[in-house]
Image (tube, rainbow, N blue to C red):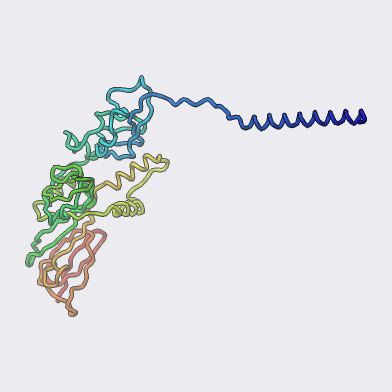
Amino acid sequence: MDKKKLILLVVALVVAVGTALMARSMFAGNATPTVEAATKEPEGPRVLIATRKLPIGTIITADALQFKLWPEEMVQDAYFVEGQADMNQLLGTVARFPITAGQPVTQGALVKPGDRGFLAAALGPGMRAVTIPVSAKTGVAGFIFPGDRVDLLLTQKVSGEGEAFSATETVLRNLRILATDQRTEPKEVDGKTVVSKTSLVTIEATPRIAEKIAVAQNLGALSLALRPLADTRAELDRAIARGEVVVPNGASPEEEEEILRLAMNKPQEGRSTFQTGGDVSRFQSRFGGAPKASPAGFSAPRPAASGPVNAMPSGPVVRVTRGTNTQAVPVSR
């Protein structure tokens, strides 16, 4: 074989072997797992903190608290420490003091149902607790529980210039139930709420509304009407549209939430509606006059009043409304 060809063959063989070794080294390097240093998780106690602002009287729910890592040297005996405290046992308790978001919750800041001072802690600022007697008939058959909202109806006999007549009036709205009998939370058996007969209901009210409730108990019979949750939000939207609830410009989300929360929870008085015997039956008196049916056999419908009635004349009347004042004007036959 020619010497020149032999040299070329040897060079080609060396290049092929070198290329093979390089390729093998490359693939072997990619297959080798990369060892990374494991990040050490922080250690230390986890304490219970407030996830949001909790004003006085806030009922504790699952989203209000959470366990969070806390410096060991700053942990106090009054804190709820994970592993030593059960957060589920704190659900339904009430904040006795205001707690800011991110602040550790202390054992003295929460009061449990049945504990001394629980009802006072559950009351909102400036509110009062007032109790009224109810029955299965006037208390929605026991289907009212602490935390529900109700309207208060007053039924009474009214004496006009003629004979007395019956009237029922919605005197107060959006009242929060604090307790039924001596229970501040619904009774549960096997995870189900028990419906039981209730003889007393404790209501949250402003001092002025508490006075009205005390007077109403002497005027006639009181009844409760359970409100749906959707009504509270709908009335808040209407109040905002009327300008009755104003959120200042530049208010933070927390401040705006607090303003709306207070507006939704505010008991309502005034703007009462009522029905008399004449609205229910044509054989009953409407304002103390003799019942009288229309030619068709039925009384003409009468719109609900938006203000007090200044006069109760007998005989045919025409109701004249000026602003919030409604007056019954007699009409000659």
Q: Give the percent coordinates (x, y) of residue 38.
A: 50, 26
Drawn side of residue 246 relative to residue 132, left or right: right
Q: Residue at x 80, y 30 (%)?
A: 15
- Looking at the rendered image, the quarter that the C terminus falls into is bottom left
Residue positioned 44% across, 26% down in the render: 41
Residue 12 in percent (x, y) is at 83, 31
Q: Kindly identify the residue that appears in the image at 21 percent across and 68 percent down.
A: 302
Query: Could you say which quadrant of the image residue 291 lies in?
Result: bottom left
Q: In the figure, 113 relative to 235: above or below? A: above
Quadrant of the snapshot with the N terminus: top right
Q: Nearer the viewer, residue 212 or 48?
A: 48
Q: Residue furthest right?
A: 2
- Using the image, determine if residue 156 lies above or below residue 8: below
Asked if residue 204 shows in the view, the reply is: no
Q: Nearer the viewer, residue 192 or 274?
A: 192
Tell me which corner region of the image, top left, top right, bottom left or bottom right, holds residue 280: bottom left
Q: Is residue 48 above or below residue 153?
A: above
Q: Nearer the viewer, residue 158 or 156?
A: 156
Give residue 40's position: percent from left, percent from top. Answer: 46, 25
